[in-house]
Image (cartoon, rainbow, N blue to C red):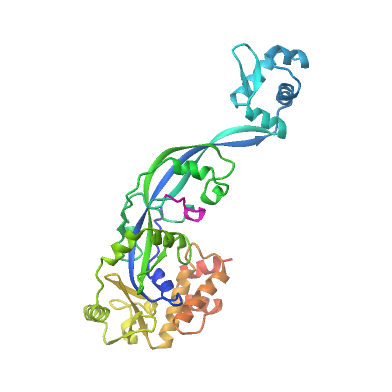
Amino acid sequence: MTVRAIYPARRAVEHAVTVPGVRPVRLFAVLWPLWEVEITASVYDEQAYEVVDRFLARALAEGGVGTRGGLAALFGLDPSLVDRCLAFLAAIGHLAVTPGGEVRLTELGLRSVRTGVRYVPKESRQKLLIERFTGRPLPRRYHRGSLTVLPAPHVPEEMLADRTRFLPLYAPTAFRHQLVEALAARPDRADYNLPAQLREIRGVAVRDAYLPAYLVETDRRDLLAYTDAGAGRDDLIENVCRDVPALHAMIAAEARADPRELWTGWLADRKLGPGRLQELPNGVWRVVLTPAAFSGPPKLPPSQVGSFQLRGHHFLQLWCDDPGLRRRAVLERALGMARLHEVRTRADLTGRAATLAARLEVAAPTLTELRDHATGERMHDHLLHLDMLE
């Protein structure tokens, strides 16, 4: 089985630094606490009536007939045939026989007669995700199979796309079954992974679950939230952050490092050659390295030009003044985007590549240029994914 890696922290940073009027300063990787609720419910399969069943049901609903004998006499049927038909309709919940021998349609049976469709109940199992701090149900986009939701408050090593370490958050709340009942009563419940056709909804199991998330702190102590539920900011998680002051207190308690001192030490440790530290107008720190620093192992690969390095919750943009090297980084990273599960069309890929190119201050690549680069560098797997795009 293929293990899907959690998307890397740099993607959250790369978006946060482009938000107008915002000065991002630190990133916190957290495991957001959820409840995963398994429910069982009845769903009604629509079937065509058998001829005899239909006439028997209509006689009970419209003909004033209420006994087995009366039904057999009305249609001139063998009583044993009537018995078999009534037994089947009783088994699917369409009628009930009283101790006195009277036959009465149930509400389901009456609804079936009115619509001319035989509704057969079936059991359906469904999973719901509920945010633990507020008890709010999560919309359908959080329930897609490609979204990583963990059953325990830790991330397996094989799922980490980088060396990010996630901090589990704790929500001091107890689950209440009324949360499911309230969701079931909502007219928009289908938007929260609870289809409208489900009836008799019952919760059968509740488990802890954790959603990997990134919280980016700004210089004004606001929090931007990112999860894999969407391409940009996660407004739902951001709203919860505003409603739960304890989250801000937890992050504020983490001492801020001096960026220049922090990254000067990082440069000395990595031995990447000369580097010039600078603070950009939006507050982001950048180190300008020579092309030799991006010459591959044991140094940095060219694709990391323009990306971000994280250390102690702070982040640093890796830069090079060589436009040719930055252009190569765009080509290689764009080819990597073609392999992402959420990138399905050429238009989507070229749009993402254009955004990346603007950030690295080079011209946006065309599909032909991406194909030529993949061919020249013998990136056969990337080329295959590129050709599979719609």
Residue 239 counted in the magenta span: no
- Give the answer, above or below, for where 156 lies relative to 7: above
Q: Looking at the image, which is closer to me, 131 or 214? A: 131
What residue is at 65 percent from the left and 15 percent from the top?
A: 102
The image shows residue 147 at horizontal and vertical percentages of 45, 56
Q: Residue 79's image quarter?
A: top right
- Give the answer, above or below, for where 324 lies relative to 9: below
Q: Looking at the image, which is closer to me, 349 or 251? A: 251
For the image, the number of numbered tags is 0
Q: Main secondary structure of the magenta part?
A: loop
- Give the answer, above or below, for where 16 lies relative to 227: below
**Is residue 223 in view from this perspective?**
yes
Side (left or right) of 11 relative to 348:
left
What residue is at 23 percent from the left and 80 percent from the top?
A: 261
The image shows residue 32 at horizontal and vertical percentages of 36, 56
Q: Quadrant of the C terminus?
A: bottom right
Residue 140 counted in the magenta span: yes
Q: Which residues are magenta?
A: 135-142
The image shows residue 257 at horizontal and vertical percentages of 24, 74
